[in-house]
Image: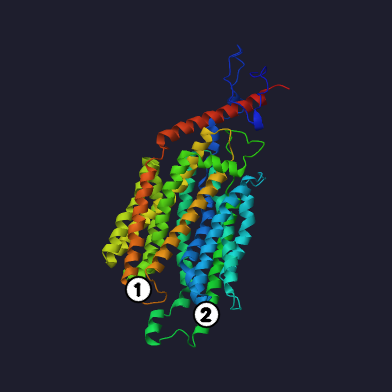
């Protein structure tokens, strides 16, 4: 039998196998059998076995929806809940949201640190974190919308549970995002799974905005502008009844969204399995988190990728965060806001498969040009006040938002693979790359909203007023049209320097296949060795 005289392949440091030397003909060709044939499998056969099923992709996508549902509901309704239902002062409401986002951002590197030190279990390395944090995420989310009986120091209640929810949702999001790298060893499969994920996440954003909004709409039916003009004061006999009704419907909405978390985690647990890439052995000792962080921050493609999408995602956040104020005070679209948001999110949802096909056929850098569609849409929206044009521009903005959501999560696995190919003896960086990127995106979200709030305060924005000054109107137009356009142009310009393209991806895929073949041959030689 071939390999009868073969010696055990020497092991290097930290349990790694060196590249397998080429097999040589020993003159026993009539009895020689390739290791792959001896086990009845080939690299191509392994790739076929590793292929993700549609069911697995669906389950993976469903698992990403709950965080987006909760995030969408929180983004649209937490501010008005804190002011109108909880009735805490505006400064305290801002403090709750700013500190909550800071807790979420701070939890990202901590999550990456602890997950990176976690040993694989029978359920995988990432699944235990998803299972463990889900109950706490549900409880903190529901209590975040609960109205306590005490009125003094309510800010402490909401600050505690909003910070806890942000931290727990981060502990859910980091392992879920990193799970992409362990779904399959095939890049096309991972890209396809990412597209499924984006469809469900955008759909989750749509569900969060519409489901929560429809349930709590009755708590905000009274027009404050109408009351100010006719009654002249906010304190009236119906206030207690309104708050009681609002408390009830907000808890119903919170409970339903908590149930969506259960659907998501069950889909992941029963429908998704972690697969470790066999091209290299796991090291005996994991790379320290902060050392791995330095490795990641020195990787040029990652720096270019991160800088570009931080600018792009900050632009999207500023545009979305100020869209309601723009419709209300700068475009006379107060009664059309819900419909415009619905058009944007539906457009983004249905266009994700289109962008997935586009990037597959034309490349990811060319697909990034689709993000630039937001520039003419927001500029026309702020310069030409027309209701029909507003609906059309909302549809176009949805196309751009879909591209900005899909591309970073489709390109990040390529960056990680590029790093692994250049640093083959430094495995275990997947969660570091993902947690770092999520941390930076959350920080950019906070910075974007901070700039917006400071700008509006600087020009004299008045809370609760039916109309705002000309300075506020101009500032809102700049925040929705001017600043996002500039940031997107800068981000796309940086993305031109991104070195990973279709050619380098093919070269990397070929190199990985050779590594896997060498690893498989080494395994088979060991199996075929006589006792």
Classify mark 1: helix, strand or loop.
Answer: loop
| Front in this rendered view, residue 418 or 39 | 418
Residue 53 appearing in the image:
yes
At x 52%, y 77%, the residue is 87
Residue 42 appearing in the image:
no
Residue 1 position, x and y percent, is: 65, 18
Residue under label 2, please give it: 243
Say if mark 1 contacts mark 2, CB within 8 Å: no
Q: Quadrant of residue 428?
A: top right
Classify mark 2: helix, strand or loop.
Answer: helix
Q: Quadrant of residue 293?
A: top right
Residue 159 position, x and y percent, is: 57, 67
Residue 303 position, x and y percent, is: 46, 43
Q: Is residue 141 left or right of residue 352?
A: right
Task: Tell me if mark 2 has few (under 14), some (14-19) or many (20+) residues whose alpha carbon lies within 10 angstroms of its own.
Answer: some
Residue under label 1, please give it: 468
Q: Is residue 286 left or right of residue 243?
A: right
Q: Is residue 392 above or below residue 49?
A: below
| Front in this rendered view, residue 256 or 507 | 507
At x 57%, y 27%, the residue is 518
Q: Is residue 431 above or below residue 76?
A: above
Marks 1 and 2, how far apart at CA: 27 Å
At x 42%, y 64%, the residue is 454
Residue 14 position, x and y percent, is: 66, 32
Q: Is residue 218 above or below residue 235?
A: above
Q: Is residue 9 left or right of residue 352?
A: right
Q: Is residue 109 above or below residue 331?
A: above
């Amino acid at each position: 039998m071939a390999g009868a005289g073969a010696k055990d392949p020497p092991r290097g440091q930290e349990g790694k196998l060196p590249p397998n030397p080429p097999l040589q003909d020993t003159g026993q060709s009539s009895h020689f059998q390739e290791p792959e044939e001896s086990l009845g499998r080939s690299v191509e056969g392994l790739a076929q076995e590793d292929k993700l099923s549609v069911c697995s992709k669906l389950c993976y996508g469903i698992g990403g929806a709950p965080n987006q549902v909760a995030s969408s509901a929180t983004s649209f309704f937490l501010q008005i809940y804190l002011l109108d239902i909880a009735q805490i002062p505006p400064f305290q409401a801002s403090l709750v949201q700013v500190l909550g986002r800071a807790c979420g951002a701070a939890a990202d590197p901590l999550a990456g640190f602890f997950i990176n030190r976690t040993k694989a279990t029978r359920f995988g390395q990432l699944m235990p974190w998803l299972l463990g944090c889900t109950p706490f995420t549900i409880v903190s989310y529901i209590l975040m919308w609960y109205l306590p009986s005490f009125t003094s120091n309510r800010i402490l209640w909401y600050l505690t549970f909003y910070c806890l929810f942000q931290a727990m949702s981060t502990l859910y999001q980091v392992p879920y995002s990193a799970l992409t790298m362990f779904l399959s060893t095939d890049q096309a499969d991972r890209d396809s799974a990412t597209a499924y994920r984006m469809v469900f996440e955008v759909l989750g954003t749509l569900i969060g905005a519409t489901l929560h909004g429809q349930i709590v709409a009755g708590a905000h039916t009274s027009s404050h502008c109408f009351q100010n003009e006719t009654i002249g004061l906010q304190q009236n006999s119906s206030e207690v009844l309104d708050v009681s009704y609002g408390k009830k419907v907000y808890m119903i909405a919170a409970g339903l969204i908590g149930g969506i978390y259960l659907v998501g985690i069950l889909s992941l647990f029963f429908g998704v399995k972690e697969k470790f890439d066999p091209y290299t052995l796991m090291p005996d000792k994991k790379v320290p988190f902060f050392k791995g962080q330095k490795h990641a921050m020195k990787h040029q493609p990652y720096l270019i990728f991160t800088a570009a999408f931080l600018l792009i995602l900050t632009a999207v956040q500023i545009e979305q965060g100020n869209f309601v104020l723009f419709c209300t005070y700068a475009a006379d679209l107060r009664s059309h806001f819900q419909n415009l948001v619905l058009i944007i999110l539906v457009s983004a949802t249905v266009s994700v498969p289109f962008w997935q096909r586009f990037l597959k056929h034309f490349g990811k850098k060319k697909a990034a040009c689709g993000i630039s569609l937001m520039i003419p849409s927001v500029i026309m929206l702020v310069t030409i006040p027309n209701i029909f044009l507003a609906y059309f521009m909302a549809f176009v903005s949805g196309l751009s938002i879909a591209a900005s959501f899909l591309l970073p999560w489709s390109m990040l696995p390529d960056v990680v693979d590029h790093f692994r190919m250049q640093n083959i003896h430094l495995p275990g960086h997947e969660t570091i790359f993902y947690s770092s990127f999520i941390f930076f995106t959350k920080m950019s979200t906070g910075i974007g909203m901070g700039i917006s709030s400071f700008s509006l305060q600087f020009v004299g924005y008045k809370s609760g007023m039916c109309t705002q000054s000309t300075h506020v109107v101009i500032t809102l137009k700049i925040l929705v049209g001017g600043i996002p356009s500039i940031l997107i142009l800068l981000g796309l310009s940086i993305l031109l320097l991104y070195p990973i393209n279709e050619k380098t991806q093919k070269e990397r895929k070929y190199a990985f296949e050779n590594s896997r073949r060498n690893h498989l041959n080494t395994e088979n030689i060991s199996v075929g060795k006589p006792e």
